[in-house]
Amino acid sequence: MDFSIKTNDAKTSIASLKAGCIAVGIYENKKLSPQAQALDKSGEITAALKSGDISGKPGSTLLLRKVAGVAAERVLLIGLGTDGELSDKVMSMAALCVARVLSTLGGNDALLALPFDGIAKQTPERDLAWAIRNSILVLRENSYRSDTLKSKKETTLSGIKKIAFLVATAQAAVAKEAMAQGLALANGIDLTKELGNLPGNVCTPTYLANTAKKLAKEFKLTVEVLDRKQLEALKMGSFLSVARGGGEAPKFIIIKHLGGKAKDAPTVLVGKGITFDTGGISLKGGSGMDEMKYDMCGAGSVLGTMRAIAELKLKLNVIGVIPATENMPSGTATKPGDIVTSMSGLTIEVLNTDAEGRLVLCDALTYVERFKPAAVVDIATLTGACVTSLGHHNSGLFTRHDSAHDALANELLSAGKATGDTAWRMPIEDSYQEQLKSNFADMANIGGPAGGSITAACFLERYTKKYTWAHLDIAGTAWKSGAAKGATGRPVALLTTFLINRAAAAK
Ligand code: BES
Ligand code: MN
Ligand code: ZN
């Protein structure tokens, strides 16, 4: 898909613009948007509305051909609901309608002449820039296919692939920047989806490391991959205890985008990279276990976000860190009751080998102390309990509760709201910490069935005392199950927007 911005000022009527298709909005009660009015010199659009062929409700569309007085070959009417009540949902639905219709049309190119700045009246932050970013994300989401490993590609989208947003000349600069952001985000999201959807026998720790190396080459990032020997030298006993059962070599990936000033402390992203989670000796049940190929979606979202900010040449120092391994049972695997020593020196009684995410993350969280980070955000498909708490709508957000952490939490929450990639804040309190008590080691790796996502966050919290830190549990949001099974690309939009906002604040 090829996007562009086309400008038009009041002097030229949009009726004179040549295109394969021009899309304009109409409202319920047979009302035309200003753009639709401009195409209605012949009265054909009004007549179509009168005939009842299109209701104007969100989701309704009507295609007219060869409208008199309109240079474009086709006019696509898009229902926008009640006039004056444009919402982000309606705009997303409009973009989806455009995507679906264009994918079935002949013609070369489409002009989108929708009221992109119309929502701003209700929701100020939903401005023209938001609408363009959002439309690109919806169009790209609609055209994504996970057919990399199919010998016959799913019918690749035919139809119109050249799409221009029509905006006033004065808005061109804002629109172009929004388009660049939308494209970078979509590219990052696609990478994250692709990595998530690849199976555990393809997307191994080595594959993740090679993906990071490829990104580094393409976007001039620096990358370093540590192997088992180097991890042993670093005394990452907790991470390595998870890697004992599997045949795939563990990898510890460090990828840096240093777009800020040399002296500026970096923002660090740490992504859980379990390329397949069987549970280990505490083996999971068989049904649906294939979905544990998605247990590297935290890592995938770090790579997708690095790709997005690198493409944008973001003026910020960002470091991505990924502990990657599979979690397998075998004769050499860690056993329940085994006690391991983490890089921090703290000992951990592994009561359940299926609580492996925290075991790999704790060593990564200790490792990143060396960067003296401005903030650390870890992203992990950490607990089934988080899915029970928040379902599939919100990622779980955990931080300590002081003013520095409240500020970081609010940055992440508002970045989520801005993109519809939302998170919900959960507590971290000493009363939950007590559930991690072990009779034999400094802590246990599980805290019992109650408040499982919170005790998991409490475990991580113990390794993050030296910096400002937040944890995103994406177990419910990173992929979809059932007929529409597939990675969502979340929370790349949240993370990238969070970093874009940080770069803007640092200016
Ligand atoms: N990767 C899983 C969490 C998970 C489970 C995410 C289901 C999405 C759907 C994680 O490693 C895990 O197995 N967690 C255990 C923790 C428990 C043993 C304390 C869980 O959630 O059951
Ligand atoms: Mn597990
Ligand atoms: Zn896991």
Image (cartoon, rainbow, N blue to C red):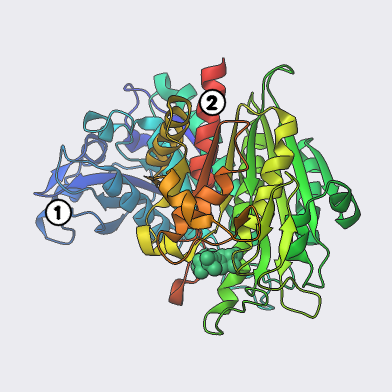
Where does residue 402 sit, x and y in percent of width and height? 43, 29
Considering only vertical position in the picture, is 392 above or below 400?
below
Lateral position of residue 375 relative to residue 321, left or right: left
Residue labelled with disc 1: 49
User: Can residue 203 be seen in this snapshot?
Assistant: no
Relative placement, left or right, of 86 versus 323 is left
Residue 505 in view of the camera: yes
Residue closer to the observer: 472 or 76: 472
How busy is the neighbourhood of tag 2: few (under 14 within 10 Å), some, or many (20 plus)? Answer: some
For the residue marked with disc 2, what is the amino acid? Arg
Could you say which is closer to the camera, residue 490 or residue 122?
490
Give the residue displayed 28% in from the left and 41% down from the top. Answer: 69
Circle 2 SS class: helix
Q: Which of marks 1 and 2 is nearer the N terminus?
A: 1
Residue indicated by mark 2:
502
Question: Real-space Cα distance between discs 1 and 2?
Answer: 47 Å
Residue plotted at (91% across, 54% down): 229
